[in-house]
Amino acid sequence: MKKQLFESPFGAEYTKCVLDNGLTLYVMEKPQFSSSYAMFGTKYGSIDMNFSDREGNRVDIPAGTAHFLEHKLFESEDGDAFSKFSVTGASANAFTSFDRTCYLFSCGDNFYDNYEILLSFVQSPYFTTETINKEQGIIGQEIRMYDDSPGWRVLFNMLHAMYYSHPVKNDIAGTTESIAQITADTLYKCYNAFYNPSNMFVCVCGNVDTNRVIEMTKDLIKAETGYKVERFMPVESEGVKEHLVEEKMSVMLPIFTFGFKQKCDERLKLKSKVCINLLLETLAGDSSPLYARLTKAGLIGESFDFELMSYEGAACIIFEGESEKPEEVRKEILKEIENIRENGIDKRLFSAVKCRFFGEEIRKLDSVEEMCMQFAESNIAGYELFDKISAIKSVSANEVFRYIDLLREDNSVLSVIKPLEE
Amino acid sequence: MPERINEICYGAEEVFVKTDRFNTSEISFNFYLPLDRERVAEFALLPFILTSCGKNYPDFSRLNFMLSKLYGADLFASSEKIGDYLLLKMGVSTIDDRFALDKESISSMSVDMLVDLIFNPKAENDSFCAEDLAREKRRAIESIKSEMSEKRIYAATRLIEEMFDDDIYSVKKCGTVKQVEAITGESLYSAWEYMLTHAFLRINVVASKEPAGILDVVKENLEKFERKNVTDCSKTTPARRRALVKRVEEKMDVAQGKLVMGFNVTSNQGEDNTVLSVMANLFGGGPYSLLFTNVREKMSLCYYCAASLVKEKGFMTVSSGIEPQNAEKAEKEILNQLSKIGDGDFDDDTFKAVIRGICDSLKTLNDSQSALDTWYANRIFIRQNYSPDEVADKIQSVTREEVSRAARNVALNTVYMLMPKGEK
């Protein structure tokens, strides 16, 4: 086992262990806290649709399988995990995103009992035709719920218009049709490929004892060595499929997502992510000239936001919100990008934005949940948590400026959900 | 958790939750006014316009720039309905001074800014500035429309409207689009004066230490107003019961049907009503609840089916997303599970799980400043200012019989259904 202690200049520290079986464990002690949080995750999300199984055969699975597996893993042969957590009083949950599936709990008392339940149920798959059929109805309704969510639809419409073949364009929960193809065999194949220690991580933060957590983890994670799943990502063509995509829904105000596709052969590195996020905040944050102009012109409101999405083989920068005139917002954003390209970054604003980012990192330390999310992100993206703070402090405006070239109009897509006509 | 209540002056107090566990400090000003159908939109706009600019911070971009310089100080505002009252909240959360790279005094600068924004608005001739007003009105309208676009929220709001059709509680927390459009600089200024003259004020501080001199500063500022007839927050009228269940069905272009049911519950004003909390949680709280295990897991009728209790107003709602043809079946099963609680037909393990679950969640509240802020802001109606840990102790002593009795006093009041067009 490889064990390392990471310390930050402002008092926080955490231990990272890589067990012999390949599992990575992060533990941050918060002795003054009343609660603790733990998360057991696998680097397996909705985009992992093509891979080779343990026998080396290529497997192609229907959209929504990772999410379906997440639902089904709560059931084991000896009862469901929720009923086990109900004995200890923890609040348990799970989520699936594009590139990960995570199982988690938060609790005030009985951390170690809860921890044992978490590690044990995630390692005890039990899938039968009967339980799978039952889940089709529940997930079918979850999909329907998202069908009615304009915020969700506008994003996936954009991804669909942006990507030719990358599976990021598929809805995380799949469709009613795609999940109907899932069988117990599909789930076991995925489980065996992706739920192995070297593809997984555990994050713990709260009122816990690091050594005890390490010992328990060593005891409870099944021994296995060396297996590494091979993924196949379709080769994504350059450019976007469509520049504009529109749909009508029962909304009161048009909703938009304006995205820029990035050329992305591999995952973005930490430094690049920090630079892009600093650039976006300087470009469109609430103290930027663009934000002031858009607000003054009545083009955006509270919901305006932006984000960098970055996964294996797919990255994009998106601006989103509600507006009577999404096309005008698009024009203004492009105008400001040109302005920065010509005149550079406002140094005063950039320095204030850096202060804000630094403060946000300190703030995150106050939440056991947020810390576990951060550990998971650092594990998947391949960096150490406190490196992010160092990167924020050290990066210069000139370095950030270079990333403005990522925002190219010919790689952009505007997705709009418009109100239905009466 | 050590917490203290300090009286500031007539109609104003401070709750100080002293805690060393955070890297940040949070302070919020909570103004309580009775719900007023005519003026709700004006009052609700106040927290937002006041935290967007001020006499000494005239430009909102500049204000945001300063907040960034203060290490991303989070200036927050909201308007919420609590019982028959409107809670107008304005606050700021900052990282502690010890983290400042240039030894700046982040927290005192942020608190000074907040106080200044609340008491010195950007106004001329007793009227808010037209440009700021236009901006904030537009934002408010966007937020009202945005809620209507999200059908789960829309359906929940429609249930309240229908269930409380003859009650002040049907007022929307931010008013209607029409009401927002009608706000003028003068009417808003008069609402601001009204708030500072008549609203009860509770300041919550969740931090390792109190901001120096804060109570004196607030007192001094409040004294500039003729404080009188300050809101008495103890007069919420419980939801009226109906002889016949009211049924409303609406059609819309949606993929999934939404079923929302409103129930009367018997709550004691000024009390914690721990029995009701246990009953509602057993009914439709966590994954161990009867609605989750039966309506979702056993019958596969939905993805979500959850109960939500509004103790101060004496009602509970259950909401679910379903296929239209399953609506009747789901409603029947929801009522069946409620009557099972009334009959004591639930196993002991589930009951114990509910108690443990609530107590455990209450304990985790201590680790979130915003959760503690909300906790103390919402306890304005309750005579004893218990901490989450103290309420958890009271939850432990709730019995099965009490819970069954509470369930027998629950009565279905209104059923609201939002159905896809073309369905029967």
Image (cartoon, rainbow, N blue to C red):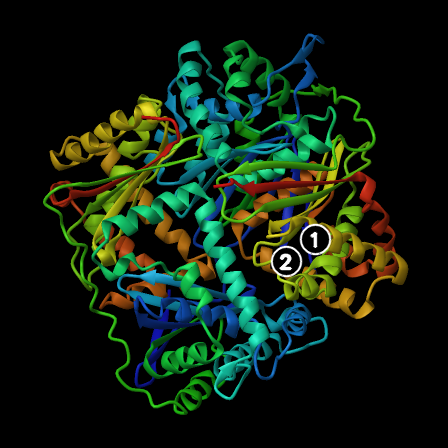
Residue annotated with mark 1 = A328
Q: Is residue A102 left or right of residue A116?
A: right
Residue B48 x, y percent position in the rendering: 50, 68
Subunit bearing disc 2: A
Q: Which mark is residue B361?
A: none
Determine contact: label 2, label 1, CB under 8 Å. Answer: yes
Position of B198 compared to B125: left or right?
A: left
User: Which of the chains bears the disc numbered 1?
Assistant: A
- Quadrant location of the N terminus of chain B in the rendered image: bottom left
Amino acid, disc 2 = Leu
Q: Quick one: B186 or A73, which is closer to the camera?
A: B186
**Which residue is the site of mark 2?**
A299
Residue type marked 1: Glu
Q: Residue at x 84, y 61 (%)?
A: A397
Is B113 placed left or right of A329 in the picture?
A: left
In front here: A214 or B130? B130
* Residue A27 visible in the picture: no
- Residue B153 sits above or below residue A96 on the image: below
Q: How many marks?
A: 2
| Crowd class of label 2 (few under 14; some 14 to 19; many from 20; radius 10 Å) | many
- As helix, strand or loop, the secondary structure at mark 2 comes to loop
Instruction: Say above or below: A211 vs A69.
Output: below
Percent from the top left, x then y, of residue B390? 28, 59
**Depicted A282 relative to depicted B250: above or below:** below
Q: Looking at the image, which residue is at 79% across and 70% down?
A: A348
In-front residue for pair A229/B129: B129
Position of residue A305 in the picture relative to residue B332 (left or right): right
Sequence order check: which comes first, mark 2 or mark 1? 2
